[in-house]
Amino acid sequence: MKKLLFLLFIVGGLCLGTNAWGQLLPKPASLKAGNGVFVVPENLGVKTNLKGNDKTRLLQAVENALGVKTGKGAALELQLDKKLGKGRERTEGAGYGPYEGYVLEVTPKKVVIRGGSAAGLFYGVQSLGQLAKEGKIPAVSITDEPRFGYRGFMLDCSRHFFGKDFIIKQIKEMARYKLNRLHLHLTDAAGWRLQLDRYPELTRLAAFRTETDWTKWWRKGTKEYVPEGTEGAYGGYLTKADVREILAVAADNFITVLPEIEMPGHSQEVMSVYPELCCDPTLPAGKPNRHSDFCIGNEASFEFIENVLKEVVDLFPSEYIHIGGDEAGKWAWKTCPKCQALAKELGLTATKDDSVEDQLQSYFIQRVEKIVEKLGRKMIGWDEILEGGLAENATVMSWRGEEGGIKTVKSGHHAVMTPNSYLYIDHYQDAPQYMPEAIGGYQPLDHVYSYNPIPKQLSKQEASLIDGIQANLWTEYVKTPEHCEFMAWPRLLALAEVAWTPQELRGDYEDFLDRATQEVLYLKGKGFHPFDIRYEVGNRQEYREPVQHLALGKKVTYHAPYSERYVANKEATLTDGLRGGWSYNDSRWQGFIDKGRVDVTIDLGEPTDIREVYATFMQMPGPEIYHPATIDIHVSDDNEHWTELYHLDYPATVDEPYNFKDFGWRARKGSVRTRYIHYQANCSEIGGFQFTDEIIVR
Ligand code: ACM
């Protein structure tokens, strides 16, 4: 009997342990289950050595997390213990901050949280909030600290405007998952979203439009802004009062708001208000401006930037200021007399790796870094700021894969990893036909979760320069707050766990999925609109199993090249039996770019009876992937004399929505005997990209 009781005790303890793990997201670094539960009183006595504002915000955090009032007593102790984590502080970088670790002890009698800083205590309180169910907290002992200091979410407020209330709502729940950076992309071609005293025209003239739909306005439309107050005007901006309110809530939730002001590219809205700042000052003010870039040869550009950044740093306390730096067009600099005179004065000449314009961009970024530093802050930018040489103290956000981040840390600089292949949450998260329109791509929850931010080729020292990670939500196709939440959640939960939890504790996706599902229900209860992961369809059926057919493994000769960016399985792609998934960038789809065409011959090795030849093409208008306009299939016995088997003219158009279509020939009856098959697909005048995954022969 005694033995049985002992066994029950052990099993009970283990169950409770599993239960406690099962409730925490992100998973803590270590957890030991105890026995019994702590019952949370309605009026919870809190004892703490915190003082001032830290005390106020921690008491508020306890009330929010547990849904109770706090009062006198010591049922919960919050002890600031600076010895905790001593020697483990991060000392530099965008992930720098106080030590965020904590120790949480829950017994049936009391709860004690020790934190290395107020932030650490705050995260202990967040764990407590997740453990509490119906007023009970299981006894537990947790020792926890984050893997990375920078755990971020970027929201694009330019393509569609998202205002103060929405941002504050997100901040409050980001904190529950221990995220600590909110990067606001405040300016871009679609609208300037920050009120400035010195340049009120930016928000008066370039923060509104009448067309809400991105494709209609930007890709096919006028790209025209309308003045504030115009009837039917759509858009908006954050006033300084809005920003202060956001910052106050962010501070209470231990979140740093990182402001981004785009330059030198993505600045059409600035150029439409101040055409004198682009390379062609003759363009009329107030009109859509095809120039995206600041003129680098014009000193007025730097004056403007300094004035803007001055107001930005007056408003935002963030140690880092994001200056964009991505995707500058650079084409206008090539023929601009001022830019070219500057290049000459600087003695710039093209090198193997960098054009004169790349070096002009580098000159620009280095000057902007000096401005940022003069204003007492540090600069961070997208990975293009590496081009032409990185500014002295810059931190890089690596978005075009991980290469930028790797190069950055190998040169001794800090990096934040935000690779589009894992952390771009503007991509579809499930089968696109069941999702609201998105920009393209396929970024399901398990893929975000599978990301390991430390590339294998880095030394320990280099790896220590990776400050953390960030998920980016660009909003070209995200029009409403509801859609924005749908795209962000639950993928931000995966991001949170990747950023916080030690890599070795993240092996079990199903375990994460269970916890994420609970959190989706929690978020719904809080009035959020997450994607309900319980109803996920998953990847394309064809992706899941290799396909058998007569051309499998047969040699393919290319008469026109495939894109170097989308090589898939190179020359083997079209006959390797591996079909693509929902997205063109899953290394199964081969890309044919820039008026490229599919033009290949398959050698079946011997005369073979065939009844069917086809390839599937993807149409995904967001990233400009279109169906082919003509298909031609010829057959031959000797690779010299050809017989036409099939011809199709297809009305390819940018308007056709996302879909997959098979293009090819099927015998009405009987079969055709051949050894060689020549398959051609040409794009139409609309250009764009073509993507196909396999040429299937049966
Ligand atoms: C980016 O996605 N252009 C940073």
Image (spheres, grey):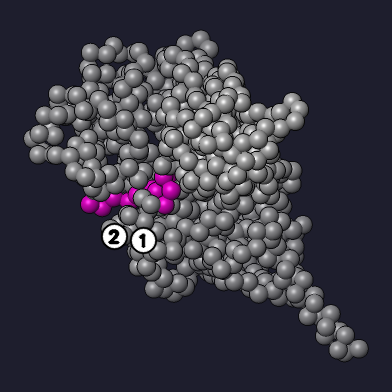
Answer whether residue 141 is magenta in the image. no
* Disc marking residue 412: 2
Q: Amino acid at mark 2?
A: Gly
Q: Is residue 450 above or below residue 483?
A: below
Pinpoint residue 2: horizontal percent, then vertical percent. 87, 89
Q: Which secondary structure lies at badge 2? A: loop
Residue bearing the label numbered 1: 465
Quarter that holds the N terminus = bottom right
> Which residue extends farthest right?
1
Q: Are marks 1 and 2 in contact (CB under 8 Å)?
A: yes
Q: Which secondary structure lies at badge 1? A: loop
Q: Is residue 71 above or below residue 335?
A: below
What crowding class fits label 2: few (fewer than 14 Cα within 10 Å), some (14-19), or many (20 or more)? few
Residue 360 seen anywhere in this rendered image of the structure: no
Q: Amino acid at mark 1?
A: Leu
Report the front residue among 305 and 281: 281
Q: Residue at x 65, y 40 (%)?
A: 608
Q: Residue at x 49, y 20 (%)?
A: 684
Report the front residue among 430 and 471: 430
What crowding class fits label 1: few (fewer than 14 Cα within 10 Å), some (14-19), or many (20 or more)? many
